[in-house]
Amino acid sequence: MADRLENMSAWAAQLRRRSAADRFDLYTRVSLYVLSAGEVVVAVAIATGPPRIEPVWGATFIALAVLHAASGVALLHRGINWFLGHGSWPRQVMVLHIVLGGCGVLSALLAFPHVDGGDPEGYGSAAFGVLMFIIYVIVALTPRLTMLRLASTAVSSAVLAGLAMLAFGWSFRPAMAGAVSCLIGMVAGGSTYRISVWMLGAVWETERSRETESRLAVAEERLRIARDLHDVLGRNLSVIALKSELAAQLSRRGRDEAPAEMMEVHEIAHDSLREVREVVRGYRHADLAAELAGARSVLRSAGVDSRIIGDGTQLPWQAQDALAWVVREGTTNVLRHSDATECVITVEKAPSGTTEVQWASVTMENNRAREEQPAERGGNGLAGLGERLEGLGGTLRAESLQGGRFRLTAIVPVRPAPDDERTPRAESPTLKETP
């Protein structure tokens, strides 16, 4: 007794650990299987009730009901799996189930005395027998039937049942009553099964959607980290390489500025490490003003005459964060993919024609663009930046102009924000502007 209780407790605990979809699946399947197996109970009640029939006919009727119930449960089980996308439709089991159902209908019509002075109660027993076999044929097919097909199948089956009763000598009124009873029973039973199967499919579809959403969230987080790492390390490593080369040249010339340049390289490396940690934690936000100052400093160190128009300090932090990444990636592209001697960075805010939404933009234009400028080759940095802006409802356009010039334009929507939200949540470590 104690072992049984322990086993039941373990089974209950295992059931509780299942997901909600698993539990609903189990409850629904067990309920439908038990209802289908109930055909045997109904058959025994019909065969043993009044009127009395020959034992051979009674045994035949019950045996056919047992086989029909077994094939019905098997068909329903595999049919539900097919409906949920697992396996193929069990055609052989379906044919066997329909054939057994037809044999059961014939046994019901032959077993009970209902004509030529027979017991009038035989009408009711025969009608219940016919109704039972036809209904259980239909409910086992519900995973395959739509509601429209279910209705048409119920009507045609009821008509065939009525014609069969007339063919076996029934008068019109009992045959009509039997056909109507078959129709009502098939519609009620079939729709109950069909709705249960549909609900089971809807639950699993919702579960799959949640799993897909979780996987997409993981994939988006990985893409965010990859994109942010590219944005962070791409510019900083370019600056480290540039300043290291500058420090080496200054050292060879015996200039006193060489140690200061190397200390700045050291600071940039530490800033990069801190930014990488912030990227992984997901707390990193860029500061537009700081990025503009850093871009001016880096471009000046590379011998690029830079001019900055506007600062964007009055923009909400979301817009500043997005445009700051544009400045960072654009500066990296100027250093890597051009021999520029000048670069103009323009920050603007213009109304869109409505009072609810305005647009802020950053435009970076430089000369001496190389042929492999990312406008033609679709660099990963600009692609990731475009995805970032798309998520905010913005756009990114890179275009090559006449005379070897290159222009990068980013536009993001700006919505009114309280005064305390006009600055970023956290400042990104950036280069100090050198005098």
Image (tube, rainbow, N blue to C red):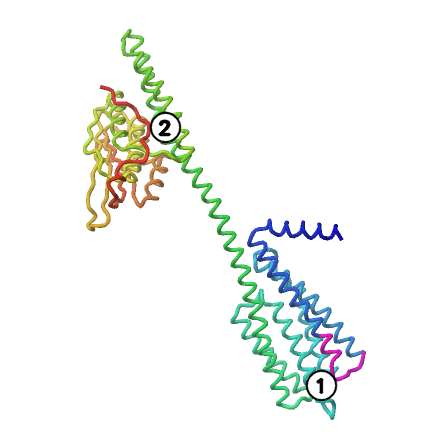
Image coordinates for residue 323, horizontal then vertical, percent: 28, 36
**Which callout, 2 or 1, points at the residue further toward the start of the chain?**
1
Q: Residue at left 38%, top 28%?
A: 275
Q: Quadrant of the C terminus?
A: top left
Q: Residue at left 24%, top 22%?
A: 300
Task: Tell me the residue that label 1 is attached to.
Answer: 122
Q: Is residue 209 magenta?
A: no
The magenta segment is 43-55
Image coordinates for residue 378, horizontal then vertical, percent: 35, 36
Q: Amino acid at mark 1?
A: Gly
Q: Nearer the viewer, residue 83 or 314?
A: 314
Query: Vertically, is 344 above or below 60?
Result: above
Q: Is 320 on the left-hand or right-hand side of 139? A: left
Q: Residues within 10 Å of mark 1 (few under 14, many from 20)?
A: many
Q: Nearer the viewer, mark 2 or mark 1?
A: 1
Q: Residue at left 53%, top 62%?
A: 199
Mark linked to residue 234: 2
Q: Amino acid at mark 2?
A: Gly
Q: Is 122 on the left-hand or right-hand side of 418? A: right
Q: Nearer the viewer, residue 303 or 319?
A: 319
Image coordinates for residue 158, horizontal then vertical, percent: 60, 80
Image coordinates for residue 263, horizontal then vertical, percent: 33, 15
Marks 2 and 1, how far apart in space? 90 Å
